[in-house]
Image (spheres, rainbow, N blue to C red):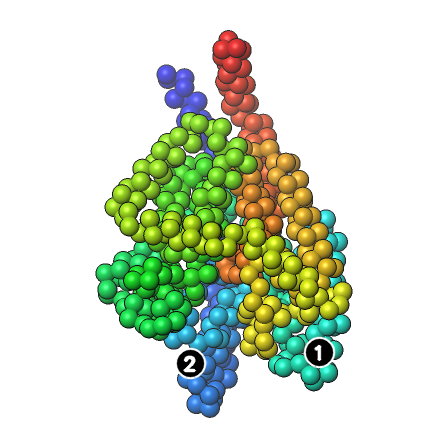
Amino acid sequence: MLKSKKKKKSQKGKKQSEQPPLSLKEQLAKKRQAQETRKKLISLVSGSLFFGIAVGLPLAFAVKPLIGAAIAAGIPCLVLSYVYPRQALWFFLIYLPFSGTVQYQIMGGNAIFSLAKDAFFIPAMLGLMQECKQKKQPFMVPKKLLTTLWLLLGFSLLTLFLVNLPLQLSGEAKGNPFPQGILGLKVLLGYVPLIFCAYYLIENKKQLLFLARLHLILAIICCLLGIVQYWMLDSGRCEGTRNATGVDLFTASIEAKCFVGGSLTFSPSENQIRLPGTLPSPWHWAWFLIPNSALTFTVAFCDPKNVWRITGLVGMALVFINAVISGQRIALALVPVVTVFLLILTGQITNLKRFLPIGIGLGILLFGVMVSNPTVVQERIDSFVTRWQASPPTKFIEEQFGWAIKEQEGIFGRGLGTATNSTRIFGKTVLVETFHPKILYEMGWFGLLGFLIFVTHLMVVAFQSRQSIKEKTLRSFASSYWVFLLIISYFPYWYPLDTDPVAVYYWFFAGVIYKLPEIDKQEQEAKLKAAQENPELETKAGKKNGRRSLSRSSRR
């Protein structure tokens, strides 16, 4: 025992000796650097704020006070996001799930605030590009992906200049087809650079775990706020649309907003409930819950710490509960389906020791919710079954493809943005409720083929990255994120990649997967270094592995 204590003390001594105390000169240099950083930040904030006020104040009097305030606050955001791109990207990810609440509950529903998230993303992307240029690093990584990305971009630009531009110049089309096409291109490919941003944002395993846990906490907070929203509507503290008449009983309304988020429908007499949670609309909320069924699952099954795995279980349960009470049929259908896919395709279902406690715990929580709210659960199930019987998804998708094929007038489609909901400010849009027929309608067969080639190539490169990872935790993270990408890449119903926040999560976590092999190399090098510095630990690990192999062989 005395020998072991001496060894521990010597090991502690070694660790302390590895990090010697800083000299007085080094301490003073560190203080000077901190002061310079502080001065730079104060100078940037004060200068950009002064310029923002100088521009925003006249607009506040000439147009609207809110627009003037937005400009005054927006200019410092743009400048700081460019100078501090990594911090801006973290803020962008945090802001995203609360965007609807900020826009409608705090800023009064002004449309300019729907673009607020891009005030962080775009300058941050440009800042990272500039940093890569200075360090002589390639911004667009992995390079394997560039061929098919340029192919898709090429087909998109052909549609923009051969369809949208002639329509604009002809003067026969209503609205502005060319600006509509530019916005449609931004919706389709605008967040693809997040692949490259994520690659440079997540630098090590510690940051990866922080990212996963951050999204878990965001999911828990948003889901709790969603439950409070439902309770306030159900208890009558918010009126919702229960006293509306006619068509308004079935239509989501901004006037009916409650506590958080934007437009909603709450007409219990008509069994019509569509909640937005913390986001602008019920549709956005559904596509927040679906990816978060994967993100909470990742922490519950892959995090190395028990506390976070249990917290992941809580997050999964809250996502399930919100999928039921939100009234969104697609969330009710896909949240459990995504979970089952993840269990099977990641191989976690075979890990019974970890799966059973989580599965039992989740089952008890959900059973408790169902028992305490049987009417709500039954209503949601009946609504889902009725909708399925009235319009089976397979038949509906087939009809949409048939319609899109008949509508083709040329080989490059009817024009970018002409079936994208968010471009209607520039002209009339057609409602297409499935993603791949929407691309076919807008960009023709070449555009659809280009998109499918690109996402398939993205999936193949992501799978290759996953296969090259040796460290167990990192491999588990890569598997979970890859399954999430797989589902979204080929999911034909509605249009997830046109919708926040799932479009952001899709491209961002693709970049995270591509970074994981590099992080894996860091971990392998750190283990090798530790083994070289402490050969005793290596021999102990070898003895443990030998015992395990002997016990396995004896069992056989």
329 in relation to 239, above or below: above
Task: Determine which quarter of the picture holds residue 421.
Answer: bottom right
Sooner in the amino-acid sequence: mark 1 or mark 2:
2
Expressed as whole percent of the image width and height from the top left, the position of residue 113 reads 46, 72
Q: Nearer the viewer, residue 114 or 343?
A: 343
CB atoms of marks 1 and 2 within 8 Å? no
Which mark is on residue 167? 1
The residue furthest top is 554
- Sort mark 2 into few (<14), some (14-19) or many (20+) by Cα contacts within 10 Å: some
The residue to which callout 2 is attached is 66
Q: Secondary structure at mark 2?
A: helix
Give the residue displayed 71% in from the left and 70% down from the top: 160
* Residue 340 in sight here: yes
Given residues 425 and 475, the one toward you in this image is: 425
Q: Residue at x 46, y 88 (%)?
A: 63
Residue 536 in sight in this render: no
Q: Residue farthest to the bottom?
A: 62
Q: Position of residue 513 (x, y in %)?
A: 59, 45
Residue 94 percent across, percent down from the top left? 45, 58
